[in-house]
Amino acid sequence: MTEQETALRELLTKGTDASFLREMIGFAAERLMELEVGGLTGAGHGERSPDRLVQRNGYRQRDWQTRAGTVELRIPKLRRGSYFPCFLEPRRTAEKALVAVIQEAYVHGVSTRAVDDLVQAMGGSGVSKNQVSRLCAELDQRVGAFLSRPIEGEWPYLWLDATYVRVRQAGRIVSVAATIAVAVNSDRRREVLGMATGVSEAETFWTDFLRSLARRGLRGVKLVIADAHEGLKAAVRRVLHATSQRCRVHFTRNALAHAGKGHRRLVSAWIGTAFAEPDASPGTRPRST
């Protein structure tokens, strides 16, 4: 896995929407199984065709352990012969390829080439370009629906973060900022609220991103946790009228950059001890003489 894929996965896992990622993995796996079985039977599910070679015979359940958790698969059964998905065979890199395609869908939509490569990695064969294109459209549609869903209720705490990934635009590979918004609502439930890409983390980009969340219903934000990017803080003040707090991870990273190599472990321990305190009293209590 490349460094940018790892960074993007870290962004996606900041929310508790791993269930959505599991659903997407299950959805794509189901579609690929249907394409494979359609090739074996000579006809699609429920299709009446004189070219049909064998009838289907329901499904059997199987759990698939993935990086996003356990995915429940419904594997098609045949009246004659047997079918076992190629991507479940040992030593297949299918899950890694599938997660990479879902990540691509999050960032800038799925390309037919990516899905074609996915089919090959999962051991599939006999899948036409039209079938690949339909699968691309279905993946994009489901991700788009998730990222544009209405935001209901109040979300007092909002986390904002970004990483840079390389994408293909107009035939060129360029670096873009992939941003994510994770929030906790009044019921203490945490969700990924939105994700977007931009040329850079300029104030105008953050402003547009936050306004898009507000249009979808984001309200009640009291505290925004993020890095110390001036453009981001200005956008938070302008759109959300909320207080900003520096993220502990970014604060620690910036502090360690000013420490000597031999002292970084000690400085990190001091910072960790300070953050572990329940309040500010240990740091403000007068020293005894």
Image (spheres, rainbow, N blue to C red):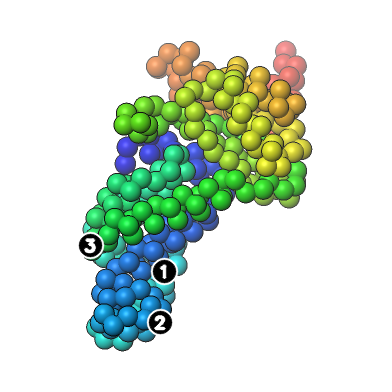
| Depicted 253 relative to depicted 17: above or below | above
Do the residues under discs 2 and 1 have CB atoms within 8 angstroms? no
Residue at the (71%, 23%) spot, across then down:
238
Residue at the (33%, 59%) spot, across then down:
131
Q: Nearer the viewer, mark 3 or mark 2?
A: 3
Tell me which amino acid carries mark 3: Ser
Q: Which residue is mark 3?
A: 125
Q: Dot 1 lies on which element? A: strand
Give how far apart the Cα atoms at labels 3 and 1 are: 20 Å
Q: Which residue is mark 1?
A: 73
Q: Position of 89 compared to 143: left or right?
A: left
Whether residue 68 is visible to the viewer of this picture, yes or no, is no
Give how far apart the Cα atoms at labels 2 and 1 are: 13 Å
| Depicted 289 relative to depicted 21: above or below | above
Residue at the (63%, 26%) spot, across then down:
207
Tell me which amino acid carries mark 2: Gly
The image quadrant of residue 180 is: top right
Which of disc 2 and disc 3 is earlier in sequence?
A: 2
The image quadrant of residue 217 is: top right
Q: Position of residue 164 (x, y in %)?
A: 43, 29
Do the residues under discs 3 and 2 have CB atoms within 8 angstroms? no
Q: Residues within 10 Å of mark 2 (few under 14, many from 20)?
A: few
Q: Residues within 10 Å of mark 1 (few under 14, many from 20)?
A: some
Q: Position of residue 37 (x, y in %)?
A: 31, 72
Which of disc 1 and disc 2 is earlier in sequence?
A: 2
Q: Residue furthest bottom?
A: 79
Whether residue 144 is visible to the viewer of this picture, yes or no, is yes
Q: Which residue is mark 2?
A: 58
Q: Position of 282 compared to 70: left or right?
A: right
Tell me which amino acid carries mark 1: Leu
Q: Indicate the quadrant containing the C terminus: top left, top right, bottom left or bottom right.
A: top right
Q: Position of residue 29 (x, y in %)?
A: 38, 62
